[in-house]
Image (tube, rainbow, N blue to C red):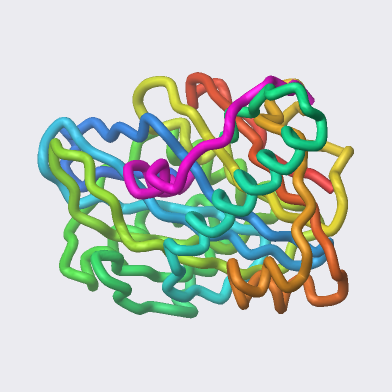
């Protein structure tokens, strides 16, 4: 994993640019292009379950409803997240970095960086459905019928998106989150959404972003009981460690996120770090998997 010297970031970073979700996007207006220049998320994984906390800044070349699709390895629990979690996590990293600098005495800093509906709820500007998809060939027809039932109307799904969804289903990814939002030519920040699901690997979807235009930067706040070394999906060469991992105690995590604290309550300390992945989304042929 690549490393670089970086300097502590400040809380205003998350006021200006909240964490961005990594989801496939299908514009209802076929003439609209969707842009997602930055993607960030916070992930907590205990070896069996993951909490994925997301919020999105996106814009389009012209106004359109957008269907966001998030493939997951198992059925998730979905709830509104707390954006303060991001701010608290970054503040903790900054404190740890400052302490390390003082101990090292070198003054160097780190720049820290067909289907079945099982859930449907509106959370703020999000209209979220958890979908159990079992048949790749009937995906398009099923989606169009479901969207029509929601009053969205017929959607044109690109050949790229059809191919990617088929790949996910072939790989036994049968659960998808559909999130319908409305965007225009100005960047908007949506409410944070939290997903909790079972997974054998720390997981973050990458292939699903192939429909997004332009290069992207993905920053992931990673929280696990120990450091991870096996990357059977996306190559570790594509993952850049933005700072030395910091240790988080259980009482500190409880202040950051009660849900993540409960997820990891079998341990008293954890490792938190920021991973960066950047490049053209069309080049992401594998998802991020680690253990």
Q: Residue at x 86, y 75 (%)?
A: 266
Q: Position of residue 1 (x, y in %)?
A: 79, 26
Query: Which of the two residues, 232 or 43, is positioned nearer the viewer here?
Result: 43
Q: Is residue 5 magenta?
A: yes
| Magenta residues, start to end | 1-22
Query: Where residue 94 appears, x then y in whole percent?
Result: 60, 44
Q: Is 132 positioned to the left or the right of 273 in the image?
A: left
Q: Position of residue 87 (x, y in %)?
A: 48, 55
Magenta highlight: main SS: loop
Side of 231 where 222 appears, left or right: left
Residue nearest the viewer, comparing 220 with 64: 220
43 or 126, nearer to the observer: 43
| Residue 142 shows in this picture | no
Q: In the picture shown, does residue 41 fall above or below 196?
A: above
Asked whether residue 90 is in view, the answer is: yes
Is 133 above or below relative to 39?
below
At 45% from the left edge and 40% from the top edge, which residue is drawn? 162
- The residue lying at 72 percent from left, 68 percent from top is 198
């Amino acid at each position: 994993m690549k490393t670089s010297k970086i300097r502590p970031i400040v809380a205003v970073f998350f006021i200006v640019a909240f964490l961005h979700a990594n989801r496939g996007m299908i514009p209802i207006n076929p003439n609209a292009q969707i842009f997602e220049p930055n993607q960030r998320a916070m992930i907590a994984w205990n070896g069996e379950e993951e909490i994925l906390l997301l919020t999105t800044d996106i814009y389009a070349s012209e106004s359109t409803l957008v269907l966001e699709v998030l493939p997951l390895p198992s059925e998730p629990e979905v709830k509104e997240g707390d954006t303060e979690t991001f701010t608290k996590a970054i503040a903790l990293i900054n404190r740890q970095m400052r302490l390390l600098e003082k101990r090292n005495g070198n003054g160097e800093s780190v720049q820290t960086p067909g289907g079945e509906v099982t859930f449907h709820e509106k959370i703020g500007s999000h209209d979220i459905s958890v979908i159990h998809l079992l048949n790749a060939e009937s995906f398009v027809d099923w989606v169009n019928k479901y969207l029509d039932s929601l009053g969205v109307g017929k959607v044109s799904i690109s050949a790229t998106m059809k191919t990617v969804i088929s790949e996910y289903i072939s790989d036994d990814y049968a659960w998808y989150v559909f999130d319908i939002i409305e965007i225009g030519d100005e960047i908007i920040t949506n409410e944070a959404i939290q997903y909790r699901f079972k997974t054998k690997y720390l997981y973050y979807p990458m292939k699903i972003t192939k429909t997004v235009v332009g290069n992207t930067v993905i920053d992931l706040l990673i929280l696990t009981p120990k450091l991870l070394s096996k990357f059977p999906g996306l190559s570790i060469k594509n993952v850049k460690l933005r700072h030395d991992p910091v240790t988080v105690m259980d009482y500190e995590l409880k202040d950051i996120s009660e849900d993540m604290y409960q997820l990891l309550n079998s341990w008293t300390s954890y490792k938190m770090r920021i991973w960066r992945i950047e490049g053209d989304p069309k080049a992401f042929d594998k998802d991020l998997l680690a253990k």
